[in-house]
Amino acid sequence: MSEIITIGISDMNITTAPNTLVTFALGSCIGICLYEPILKIGALGHIMLPNCPDIKNEKNVNKYADTCIPHMLEKLQGYQCQKTRLKAKIVGGAKMFEVSGDSSFGNIGARNIEAVKKVLQENRIQLYAEDTGLNFGRTVYFHVDTGAVEVKSFNRETKIL
Protein backbone atom coordinates (compact mmCIF):
# COMPACT_ATOMS: atom_id res chain seq x y z
CA MET A 1 0.00 0.00 0.00
CA SER A 2 1.44 3.33 -1.03
CA GLU A 3 1.48 6.50 0.99
CA ILE A 4 1.45 10.17 -0.02
CA ILE A 5 3.86 12.21 2.09
CA THR A 6 3.43 15.99 2.15
CA ILE A 7 6.49 18.23 2.25
CA GLY A 8 5.92 21.72 3.66
CA ILE A 9 7.76 24.95 2.94
CA SER A 10 11.39 24.75 4.13
CA ASP A 11 10.94 21.04 4.61
CA MET A 12 12.48 17.84 3.23
CA ASN A 13 11.67 14.15 3.41
CA ILE A 14 12.85 10.83 1.98
CA THR A 15 10.83 7.76 1.14
CA THR A 16 10.94 4.51 -0.79
CA ALA A 17 8.73 3.05 -3.53
CA PRO A 18 5.78 2.85 -3.91
CA ASN A 19 5.25 6.07 -1.95
CA THR A 20 4.77 9.54 -3.42
CA LEU A 21 6.18 12.82 -2.12
CA VAL A 22 4.16 15.99 -2.72
CA THR A 23 4.76 19.68 -2.15
CA PHE A 24 2.31 22.47 -2.81
CA ALA A 25 2.54 26.18 -3.55
CA LEU A 26 5.87 26.42 -5.29
CA GLY A 27 6.04 30.03 -6.40
CA SER A 28 9.53 31.46 -6.21
CA CYS A 29 10.45 28.46 -4.03
CA ILE A 30 11.97 25.37 -5.62
CA GLY A 31 11.11 21.73 -5.20
CA ILE A 32 14.25 19.62 -5.52
CA CYS A 33 13.69 15.94 -6.34
CA LEU A 34 16.62 13.56 -5.95
CA TYR A 35 16.03 10.02 -7.18
CA GLU A 36 18.09 6.87 -6.74
CA PRO A 37 16.71 4.58 -9.51
CA ILE A 38 18.31 1.30 -8.43
CA LEU A 39 17.06 1.42 -4.84
CA LYS A 40 13.91 3.39 -5.77
CA ILE A 41 14.46 5.98 -3.08
CA GLY A 42 13.46 9.62 -3.46
CA ALA A 43 14.03 12.83 -1.56
CA LEU A 44 12.06 16.04 -2.00
CA GLY A 45 13.14 19.37 -0.56
CA HIS A 46 11.17 22.64 -0.71
CA ILE A 47 13.60 25.55 -0.41
CA MET A 48 12.62 29.21 -0.06
CA LEU A 49 15.88 31.09 -0.48
CA PRO A 50 19.20 30.62 -2.27
CA ASN A 51 21.79 31.03 0.48
CA CYS A 52 21.90 30.67 4.23
CA PRO A 53 23.22 33.89 5.81
CA ASP A 54 24.43 32.19 9.01
CA ILE A 55 25.06 28.47 8.51
CA LYS A 56 26.43 27.93 12.04
CA ASN A 57 23.31 29.25 13.74
CA GLU A 58 20.60 28.26 11.26
CA LYS A 59 18.15 25.74 12.70
CA ASN A 60 16.20 25.01 9.52
CA VAL A 61 18.72 23.89 6.92
CA ASN A 62 15.91 22.96 4.52
CA LYS A 63 15.05 26.63 3.96
CA TYR A 64 18.07 27.34 1.74
CA ALA A 65 19.46 25.76 -1.44
CA ASP A 66 23.05 25.77 -0.17
CA THR A 67 22.17 23.88 3.02
CA CYS A 68 19.16 21.77 2.01
CA ILE A 69 20.83 19.89 -0.86
CA PRO A 70 23.87 18.82 1.22
CA HIS A 71 21.43 17.80 3.99
CA MET A 72 19.45 15.71 1.47
CA LEU A 73 22.66 14.03 0.26
CA GLU A 74 23.74 13.26 3.81
CA LYS A 75 20.37 11.70 4.62
CA LEU A 76 20.32 9.70 1.36
CA GLN A 77 23.68 8.17 2.29
CA GLY A 78 21.93 6.74 5.32
CA TYR A 79 19.73 4.80 2.88
CA GLN A 80 22.86 3.46 1.11
CA CYS A 81 22.21 5.68 -1.95
CA GLN A 82 25.17 6.31 -4.21
CA LYS A 83 25.59 9.93 -5.18
CA THR A 84 26.76 8.96 -8.67
CA ARG A 85 23.39 7.36 -9.44
CA LEU A 86 21.23 10.25 -8.23
CA LYS A 87 19.06 12.06 -10.75
CA ALA A 88 17.84 15.57 -10.00
CA LYS A 89 14.70 17.28 -11.22
CA ILE A 90 13.72 20.78 -10.11
CA VAL A 91 10.45 22.72 -10.24
CA GLY A 92 9.51 26.30 -9.32
CA GLY A 93 11.54 29.49 -9.23
CA ALA A 94 8.76 31.63 -10.67
CA LYS A 95 8.67 35.39 -10.60
CA MET A 96 5.52 35.80 -8.55
CA PHE A 97 5.69 39.55 -7.90
CA GLU A 98 6.08 42.40 -10.32
CA VAL A 99 8.49 44.77 -8.67
CA SER A 100 9.66 47.95 -10.33
CA GLY A 101 13.31 47.96 -11.25
CA ASP A 102 15.43 44.85 -10.96
CA SER A 103 15.34 44.30 -7.20
CA SER A 104 16.63 41.09 -5.67
CA PHE A 105 13.21 40.53 -4.04
CA GLY A 106 11.50 40.51 -7.43
CA ASN A 107 14.07 38.07 -8.80
CA ILE A 108 14.14 35.62 -5.90
CA GLY A 109 12.88 32.79 -8.15
CA ALA A 110 15.74 33.29 -10.61
CA ARG A 111 18.23 33.48 -7.74
CA ASN A 112 16.82 30.25 -6.31
CA ILE A 113 17.16 28.47 -9.68
CA GLU A 114 20.75 29.65 -10.03
CA ALA A 115 21.67 28.60 -6.48
CA VAL A 116 20.08 25.14 -6.80
CA LYS A 117 21.89 24.46 -10.09
CA LYS A 118 25.19 25.64 -8.59
CA VAL A 119 24.89 23.36 -5.55
CA LEU A 120 23.86 20.39 -7.72
CA GLN A 121 26.85 21.01 -9.98
CA GLU A 122 29.24 21.37 -7.02
CA ASN A 123 28.01 17.99 -5.79
CA ARG A 124 28.17 16.45 -9.26
CA ILE A 125 24.48 15.63 -9.33
CA GLN A 126 23.15 15.62 -12.87
CA LEU A 127 20.07 17.75 -13.51
CA TYR A 128 17.79 15.58 -15.67
CA ALA A 129 14.78 17.85 -16.01
CA GLU A 130 13.30 21.10 -14.84
CA ASP A 131 10.13 23.15 -15.00
CA THR A 132 11.24 26.53 -13.71
CA GLY A 133 10.73 30.25 -14.12
CA LEU A 134 7.78 32.10 -15.65
CA ASN A 135 5.13 33.57 -13.34
CA PHE A 136 2.83 30.88 -11.97
CA GLY A 137 2.69 28.52 -9.01
CA ARG A 138 3.21 24.79 -9.19
CA THR A 139 2.49 21.63 -7.22
CA VAL A 140 4.83 18.65 -7.46
CA TYR A 141 4.02 14.96 -7.08
CA PHE A 142 7.22 12.89 -7.02
CA HIS A 143 6.35 9.24 -7.71
CA VAL A 144 9.20 7.32 -6.15
CA ASP A 145 8.26 3.99 -7.77
CA THR A 146 9.11 5.40 -11.24
CA GLY A 147 11.05 8.61 -10.53
CA ALA A 148 8.43 10.58 -12.48
CA VAL A 149 7.76 14.12 -11.35
CA GLU A 150 4.22 15.33 -12.05
CA VAL A 151 3.85 19.12 -12.16
CA LYS A 152 0.38 20.62 -11.78
CA SER A 153 -0.51 24.28 -12.22
CA PHE A 154 -3.81 26.12 -12.20
CA ASN A 155 -5.28 26.42 -15.70
CA ARG A 156 -2.35 24.61 -17.34
CA GLU A 157 -1.77 21.10 -18.57
CA THR A 158 -0.08 18.69 -16.21
CA LYS A 159 3.56 18.04 -17.09
CA ILE A 160 5.51 14.87 -16.44
CA LEU A 161 9.26 15.31 -15.98
Image (spheres, rainbow, N blue to C red):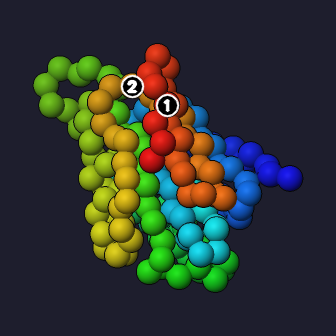
Q: Residue at the far top: name it.
A: 155
Residue 51 visible in this rendered orientation of the protein: no
In the displayed structure, would residue 95 be above or below residue 55? above
Q: Is residue 67 above or below residue 46?
A: below
Give the left or right position of residue 112, taking residue 157 as reference.
left
Residue where numbered disc 2 is placed: 136
The percent coordinates of residue 47 (x first, y second) are 48, 49
The residue identified by callout 1 is 158
x then y, percent, for residue 66: 39, 62
Query: What SS does tag 2 mark?
Result: loop
The residue shown at (39%, 25%) is 136
Tell me, yes or no, whether the two marked residues, 2 and 1, touch with CB atoms within 8 Å. Answer: no
Front disc: 2 or 1:
1
Q: Secondary structure at mark 1?
A: loop
Q: Nearer the viewer, residue 75 or 35?
A: 35
Amino acid bearing label 1: Thr
Identity of the residue drawn at 54% across and 51% down: 148
Describe residue 154's horizontal placement relative to residue 101 as left or right. right
Task: Give the image quarter of residue 41.
Answer: bottom right
Position of residue 82 relative to residue 86, above or below, is: below
Q: Position of residue 142 (x, y in %)?
A: 59, 49
- Residue drawn where x is 53% and y is 82% of the image: 82
Of labels 2 and 1, earlier in sequence is 2
Q: Residues within 10 Å of mark 1 (few under 14, many from 20)?
A: few
Q: Residue at x 23, y 22 (%)?
A: 99
